[in-house]
Image: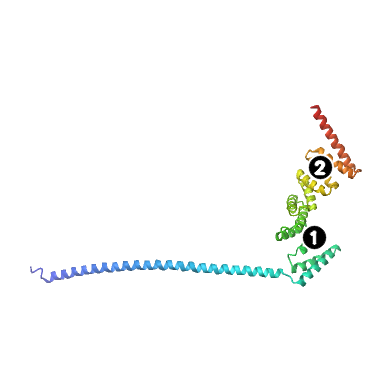
């Protein structure tokens, strides 16, 4: 009994009590710390989400502002372009007179002076059709058909329903031997201007050149409806018929030419040759 009330026992009891108090304090502090960390995490996530939303809103505002700025710039550029392309009455009159002068210079063979005047005019209106076509005609006189072709193509990009431009482009392509492309260009031209007889003539000749004899004759007979006595096109139909083994039809065309030009020995010889071939063909059929 004396042991329980001794100083040693009291010391052990006090030590044990301190350990328990420390253990309890540790758990309380740990719980508080863990709760504090959870609270910080929650607040952090909330702030992060709010920040993301704020950043998105800022980005949307910036994009909207940029889009508006771009649209405003495009409008200003368009207005500026329109402003530049609009000539005053005096400038238009000057260009009209300048074009007349250029045509006169070209007619006189003064090509260098004409070119200088064209450049002057293009500095005022670089998309002027007449000036560009006159420049292309000078290139054609220099046999630089490629440059002429490029000019006509640029003009067509600005106006793809102008028959005159297709006609000029078709010629520039044909002269370079680009028959397939020229053929399609003339077809496009015919769709724009069905009554352009020059186009029909070119299609008949190009079709023959490309070996499209049946199509060539379609255009040739279209041409002959308005020009029934055109010897060259009649001859073209005859050759197409021969290539298609249609000798009887070829003979019809050749006899029309003989009526128009009775002293054409070449046509007379060709008629005799085809008549002989037809006779031999008929005899061979009879023998069979």
Q: Which residue is drawn at 49% across and 68% down?
A: 57
- Disc 2 residue crowd, few under 14, some 14–19, many 20+, Cα 10 Å: many
Q: Which of marks 2 and 1 is in front?
A: 2
- Residue visible at 84% across and 37% down in the picture: 274
- In the orientation shown, which residue stands out farthest toward the top? 287
Residue located at (41% from left, 68% from top)? 47
Indicate the quadrant containing the N terminus: top left, top right, bottom left or bottom right.
bottom left
Residue topped by disc 2: 239
30 or 80: nearer the viewer: 80
- Tag 2's secondary structure? helix
**So how many labels did they put on this image?**
2
Q: Do the residues labelled 2 and 1 touch (CB within 8 Å)?
A: no
The residue lying toward the viewer, choosing from 37 and 57, is 57
Secondary element at tag 1 = helix
Q: Mark 1 points at which residue?
A: 137
163 or 77: which is nearer to us?
163
The residue depicted at 61 percent of the width and 69 percent of the height is 73
Measured from the top left, where is residue 103 in percent x and y?
A: 83, 64
The correct choice, above or below, for 51 with respect to 285 in the image is below
Q: Is residue 139 left or right of residue 34?
A: right
**Could you say where residue 150 lies in the image, as x and y percent from the top left?**
73, 58
Q: Which of marks 2 and 1 is nearer the N terminus?
A: 1
Residue 64 percent across, percent down from the top left: 54, 68
Q: How far apart are marks 2 and 1 (CA)?
A: 33 Å
Q: Is residue 22 left or right of residue 89?
A: left
**Residue 197 coordinates in the image, percent (x, y):** 80, 52
Q: Please say if 23 is above or below 204.
A: below
Q: Mark 1, residues whose alpha carbon is within 10 Å: few (<14), some, or many (≥20)?
A: some
Scheme of colours in the image: rainbow
Residue reaching furthest to the left: 1
């Amino acid at each position: 009994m004396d042991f329980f009330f001794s100083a040693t026992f009291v010391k052990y009891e006090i030590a044990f009590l301190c350990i328990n108090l420390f253990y309890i304090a540790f758990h309380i502090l740990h719980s508080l710390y863990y709760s504090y960390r959870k609270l910080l995490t929650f607040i952090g996530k909330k702030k992060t989400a709010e920040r993301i939303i704020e950043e998105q809103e800022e980005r949307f505002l910036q994009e909207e502002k940029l889009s508006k700025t771009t649209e405003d710039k495009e409008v200003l550029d368009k207005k500026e372009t329109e402003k530049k392309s609009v000539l005053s009455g005096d400038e238009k009159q000057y260009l009209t007179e300048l074009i007349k002068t250029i045509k006169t210079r070209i007619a006189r063979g003064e090509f260098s002076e004409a070119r200088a005047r064209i450049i002057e005019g293009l500095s005022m209106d670089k998309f002027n059709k007449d000036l560009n076509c006159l420049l292309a005609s000078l290139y054609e006189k220099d046999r630089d058909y490629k440059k002429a072709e490029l000019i006509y193509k640029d003009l067509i990009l600005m106006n793809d329903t102008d028959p005159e431009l297709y006609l000029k482009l078709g010629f520039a392509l044909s002269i370079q031997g680009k028959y397939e492309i020229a053929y399609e260009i003339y077809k496009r031209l015919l769709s724009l201007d069905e009554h352009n007889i020059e186009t029909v003539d070119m299609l008949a000749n190009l079709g023959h050149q490309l070996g499209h004899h049946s199509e060539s004759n379609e255009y040739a007979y279209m041409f002959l409806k308005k020009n029934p006595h055109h010897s060259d096109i009649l001859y073209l139909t005859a050759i197409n018929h021969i290539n298609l083994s249609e000798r009887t039809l070829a003979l019809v065309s050749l006899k029309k030419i003989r009526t128009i030009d009775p002293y054409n020995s070449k046509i007379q010889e060709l008629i005799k040759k085809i008549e002989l071939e037809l006779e031999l063909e008929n005899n061979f059929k009879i023998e069979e």
